[in-house]
Amino acid sequence: MKYDLRPLTRLIEPFEQLPGIGKKSAQRLAFYILSRTDEEIADFADSLVDAKHKIRYCNCCKNITDSDVCDICADNGRDASTICVVENARDVLAIERTGEYRGKYHVLHGLISPMDGIGPDSLYIKELLLRTGGADVKEVIMATNPTVEGEATALYISKLLKPLGIKVTRLAYGIPVGGHLEYADEVTLFRAIEGRSEM
């Protein structure tokens, strides 16, 4: 007897298209979904559709939000003179988890990567320049990842902002807490030395 696996295959395929999900993980997710109640599945599907329709980019910083302006931009208690530039909304969440940064953000939604056909016009760089041109912005922190694309993007934006008299800083990258010097690569060690602070 031959079994018709098309419904299961149709359930697995969308999971395989998600970033970081391989064939086995997609199968596990599919079988997990099948084990849920109809009500749980309906709630899950509704939350996906609801998020797709309601979540959009903040008119100011381009972070994700369900309103015209995100909660961070709307918070008058945050320091509007400092803008932290990040690659994506996940980076905002990572920095917010520290509880240390009290300024505003600007999300580029990508990095300059000529190999991938992504130039400055593909990112929200013009919007950043508009924000810094008319506001009382004193410092822009470049918090892009320490990759070739991240460094190139940071350098490009820095060159645009310097003539405006805005201080442009870069996150210090170095040895992670609990890390050992002997296992660190040269770039990490260089960043750690470069970003050293007084004790």
Image (spheres, grey):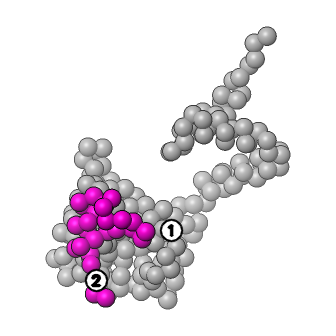
Q: State the image quarter where residue 1 is shown.
A: top right
State the residue position of label 1.
93
Q: Which callout, 1 or 2, points at the residue further toward the start of the chain? A: 1
Q: How busy is the neighbourhood of tag 1: few (under 14 within 10 Å), some, or many (20 plus)?
A: few
Relative side of 2 to 85, left or right: right
Asked whether the viewer can see residue 61, the reply is no
Location of residue 32 in the rendering, given as x and y in whole percent from the top left corner: 73, 42
Going by the numbered disc 2, the residue's amino acid type is Ser
Give the SS element for disc 1: helix
Find the magenta span and give its range: 174-199
At 60% from the left and 35% from the top, the residue drawn is 24
Q: Which mark is residue 25?
A: none
- Give the CA separation, mark 1 to mark 2: 25 Å
For this rendering, which residue is in front, 131 or 181? 181
Location of residue 21 in the rendering, given as x and y in whole percent from the top left corner: 54, 42
State the residue position of label 2.
197
